[in-house]
Image: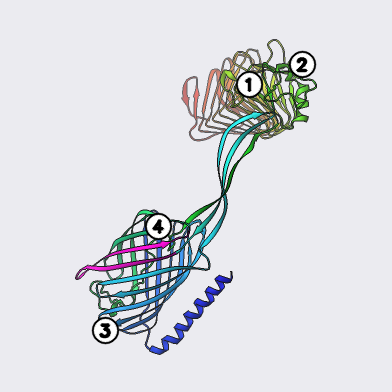
Amino acid sequence: MFKNITFTFTFSFSFFFLCFFIAPLYGREPLPVRFSAEAYTGVYTVGRADLMVSLDGDGQHNLYVDPQGGYGTDQAWYGDVGLGYRWISNDAAIVGWYVFAGHSRVENSSGFWITNPGVEVMGSRWDARVNAYIPVAGRSDDLGGIESTTAGPSFFTGHSELRTVSFTAFNEVQQVGNGADARVGYQLFSGVPLKAVVGAYFFEIPHAENVRGGGAGVDYWFDDYVRVFARYNYDNRQHSQVVGGLGISFGGVRNGHWADPSLSERLTDPVERYIANLGHGSGIPSQTIRYGRGSGSRIEVLQDNIAFFSQTGGPDNGGTNLTLADCTFENPCGPTDFSQAAVNTLNTLLPNTRMYFNGGGYTAGEEGGGSTPLRLNNGQSVHSRTADYSAPATGTERSTFAGAFTLTGNNHLENIILIPIVGRFPDTGVTLESGNNQITGSSIGTANNRYLFAIENFGDNTRVDASTIFSNILGVVTTDSNFTMQNSTLDLLNVENVGVDGILAVGGSISIIDSRIRVAGSSANAAAVGIRTSSNSDVAVTHSEIAVSNDTGAAVVLENNSGTINVLESDLNVDGTNPFIATGLPVNIGAGTVCVVNGAVVACP
C-alpha cells in the first residue's frame, strides 16, 4: 500500500510540475486535440483508445498529455496517462520523449503498476520508437495455493470404500518483469498511405524464461479518418499471433495528409507502445509461476457405513447379535442375516446404512418369511452390486429380494429385483411412508411374477428412475404426495375381473417424463385406465407413451375426476370395444402429442 501511495504521489507531483512549469516557458497556444481508437481481433478481441491533449505548442513544438487505455475479451486491460514533448530539430526530423504511468490487469486478474519512458524520432515518411517498461510497487502477485492430485482405484475395507490420492502442493504467483521494445515504421510508396512496421521486444520475467520476439505489420488509410491494419508477432512464449483490425482518428494537425505529411503535421501523431502482448488486453506479458510446497498421499473415504452381504457370508443366523465385526468387506453377512432384526441393529451400528449385495437371492420380510414387508430405517439403502462390490449390478446380475419393502424416508433401492413370494402376500411391493425416497435401476415385480399393487406412495419427493414396474391391478397409487417417474416402464396386465389403473393420483402431484405406461384390462364390468385422478390432483406427462387396451370393457388413457392433467409431446394409444383418449373433466393435451384409437390417428381432445 505504501509503495502504491508513494508512486502515485511522485508521478502526480512530476506531472503537475512539468505542466505548470515548462508550459509557461514556451508561452505558445496548444495544438488541436487528437483522438484515436482501434479495435482488432485474433484469439481475443481488443479495443484501444488514446486522447492527445496539447498543453503548449506551435508548428515546431508540442508539449502534451496523453491518456491511453485498452481492454480485451480476455478480461485484461490497461489504463495509462503520459506526458511528452516533441520538437522539430534542424527541419530534418521530429525528436521526442515521453513518460507514461498506469495500471495493467494481466492474467488471473493480477494487477501491476507500470512506468514507461520512451524516445522517438519521426521523419515525413518514417518513424522509430524505443520504449522501456518498468514495474513499480511490486512485480509479483500471490495467487494462493493449489493442489495437483491423482486418484488411484477405489478399494474396500471394513465398512468403507476408500481410495488413495497422490498430491503435489504448489503456490502460484503471477510475475512480470522489466522489458523494452523498439519499432520502426515506413511509408512504402510516395503518395500512397500504406505504411509497413517492424519491431522487436524483450522482457525479463524473474524465475521464468525471458520473452524474446518480434513482429511486423501494415497500415492503410482509406481516408482522413479510417484505417485498416494487420499485425503478426512471434515469440518464444505465445509463438505466432495474427490480428487484423480497424482504426479511426479525429483532430490533430494532420489536415488529411496521411501520405507524405510535413514534419509539423506529425506533431500530434499517436505514440505507439505495447507491441509485445499482441492479441491481449493488457500491455505487457506476464507468467504464472508455480513453486512446489511438497507432495504425498492420503486416503479418501468415498462411502462409509457399508454393510456387506454375500451368499457365502456369515454368521447366517437370522442376523441376531450383530457387531461391527460382522457385515464387513472381509467378513460379509450371509443370506439369512438380512432380516428386520439385522436392519435395526445395523441402523444403530452404522447410521444411514448402505447395504451392499453381490448377487443371489434374499428375503425381504419382517419375520424372515416375506409375509410382512421389511422396514428400512430412515436413511438406509439397499444396493445390488457386482461380485466384487465395485460397481452397480445390472440385468440378471442384480440381487433378487422376495417379499416387500416399507420405506420410512431418505431411503434408496438401487438396481434390485423385488418379487412377491408365489402363493403368498404381500400384495404391495413398496410402500413409501415418508419423503425423499428413490428407486433406481430396479424391477418391482417381473413379467411373470407381479404384485397386485406395485407401489403405494404417501411421501413427498419420491422418484422412480430407470426402473420397471409390473402389477396386476394397480401400478402406482399416490396419496397427498408428489411423485416423479422418469426413463421407466410401468406394465399392468389384469387377470382379475376388476378395474385396473396404471397410475392413480389421490391428491398431490405426479410427473411422468420419458416413460412408458402399458395397461391391458380384461374386465367387461370395469374400465382399464392409464392415469386416473381424484382429490384435486395435478399430473404432467412429457415425452412419454401411454397405451391402454381392453377387449371386453372400457379402455381410457386419461380419466380426470378432479384436478388437472397436462400432456406434452407424448403418444396416447387406446384399443378396445369402448375406447376413450380422455374422460371426465377436460385435460390439456399440448403440441406434439399423437392420439391413436384402434390403430387410427385421431384429433386429440
Mark 3, other Cα within 10 Å: few <14 / some 14–19 / many ≥20: few
Q: Give whichever of discs 1 and 2 has the lower sequence position.
A: 2
Q: Nearer the viewer, residue 517 or 312?
A: 312
**Image location of residue 204, percent across then percent down:** 43, 62
> Residue 468 at what x, y percent from top left?
59, 23
The nearer-to-camera label among 1 and 4 is 1
Label 4 to label 2, Cα distance in Å?
73 Å
Question: Residue tagged by mark 3?
Answer: 90
* Kind of residue at disc 3: Asn
Residue type at mark 4 is Thr
Question: What secondary structure do most residues of the magenta stretch adopt?
Answer: strand
**Residue 171 versus residue 230: which sits nearer the camera?**
171
Q: Real-space Cα distance between discs 3 and 1? A: 96 Å
Q: Disc 1 vs disc 2: Cβ atoms closer than 8 Å?
A: no
Q: Residue at horizontal 33%, vertical 71%?
A: 129
* Secondary structure of the residue carrying numbered label 2: loop
Give the mark nearest the N terminus, 3 or 2: 3
Residue that appears at 37% across and 59% down:
212
Tag 1, which secondary structure?
A: loop
Q: Relative to residue 5, is residue 419 depicted above or below?
A: above
- Which of discs 3 and 2 lies nearer the camera? The answer is 3
Q: Which residues are magenta?
A: 178-206
Residue 291 covered by magenta stretch: no
Residue 171 visible within the image: yes
**Circle 4 SS class:** strand
Residue at 58%, 69% (x, y): give it. 1
Colouring mode (rainbow / by chain / secondary structure / one colour): rainbow
Residue 406 in percent (x, y) is at: 72, 25
Q: CA distance from mark 4 to mark 3?
A: 42 Å
Compare marks 4 and 3 and give the one earlier in the sequence: 4
In the picture, the disc for residue 45 is: 4
Label 4: how many residues lie within 10 Å, few (<14), some (14-19) or many (20+)?
some
